[in-house]
Image: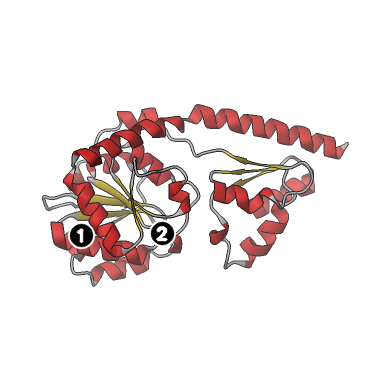
Amino acid sequence: MDVVGGSVALLRRVPWVLSERSSSEAYTTHFRDRIIRRRLGRWADGVVANSRAGYSLWHDSMRGAAETHIVRNAVAVEAIAAARPASLEDFGVRRKGPVVIFAGRLTAEKNLPLLLKIADKVSGLTAATFLVCGDGPLRGVVEEAVKSADAGDRILILGHQDDIWPLMKASDAFVSTSTFEGQPNAVLEAMACECPLVVSDIPSHREFLSAETADFASTEDDFVRAILRALQGTPDVIKRVNTARDQVGQYGARAAALAYETIYEKASAGHSRCAE
């Protein structure tokens, strides 16, 4: 949409602000992303990124007075607080035991092979059920892999869920195995849902998380150990959950809306000056 929207904006000579939701690792394969979007994006009147990685992608390449900004993703904290935990039986959870949830697009950067290995091992050790929520081009691959997993009957592929918060609130841990991100909404929502976080040790996670709010992991064994710790619900785990819940409050919708309003006004004013 940046290519289509940007092209129309340039042809019609109207202000255009490009939105960057990821980082440079996302743009290594498709010609459209590597070349066309990059070259066209230089002519935007501004760029809004949700992470430092996205900011760095554009900061040094913009033309003229165009500015690059960071506006963090907004989280519906109050609405999440009002949500009630889901009845897991309604989603096919038939066994008693802990529940671990993943939520995200089923794409390569989510490192799904590692996720499934972790799910298979943890389910075998604890009789935990893993919920895989999301859809995408790799869904078929994931479903085939689950069929051959030792604990495949405890790995449930739920597809896209419009109402993910009740599922997060009913789960005992949230896991993200991503190799890169922007600022992932699912992690922010899990924080607000008071679901213990086990995340990959990547810069995009470290940018807004710390050892006080999440357990970081790099290898399969690291993830397994971290999830087992999360499932124990020890005082340290509860403390991280509470700290994460408190910190996510800074990502309210009002702050993001005000930031966008200021950016759009500046972009419009700058565009008008260039057109004179």
Which label sits in the foreground, 1 or 2? 1
* 22 with respect to 225 (left or right): right
Above or below: residue 41 compared with residue 29? above
Q: Residue at x 49, y 30 (%)?
A: 253
Q: Which residue is mark 1?
A: 122
Above or below: residue 109 compared with residue 184? below
Q: Position of residue 41 (x, y in %)?
A: 69, 52
Q: Amino acid at mark 2?
A: Lys
Q: Earlier in the sequence, mark 1 or mark 2?
A: 2
Above or below: residue 201 compared with residue 162? below
**Which quadrant of the view contains residue 263?**
top right
What crowding class fits label 2: few (fewer than 14 Cα within 10 Å), some (14-19), or many (20 or more)?
Answer: many
Q: CA distance from mark 1 to mark 2?
A: 18 Å
Q: Position of residue 7 (x, y in %)?
A: 72, 52
Q: Secondary structure at mark 2?
A: helix
Q: Which mark is residue 110?
A: 2
Which quarter of the rendered picture does the C terminus lie within?
Answer: top right
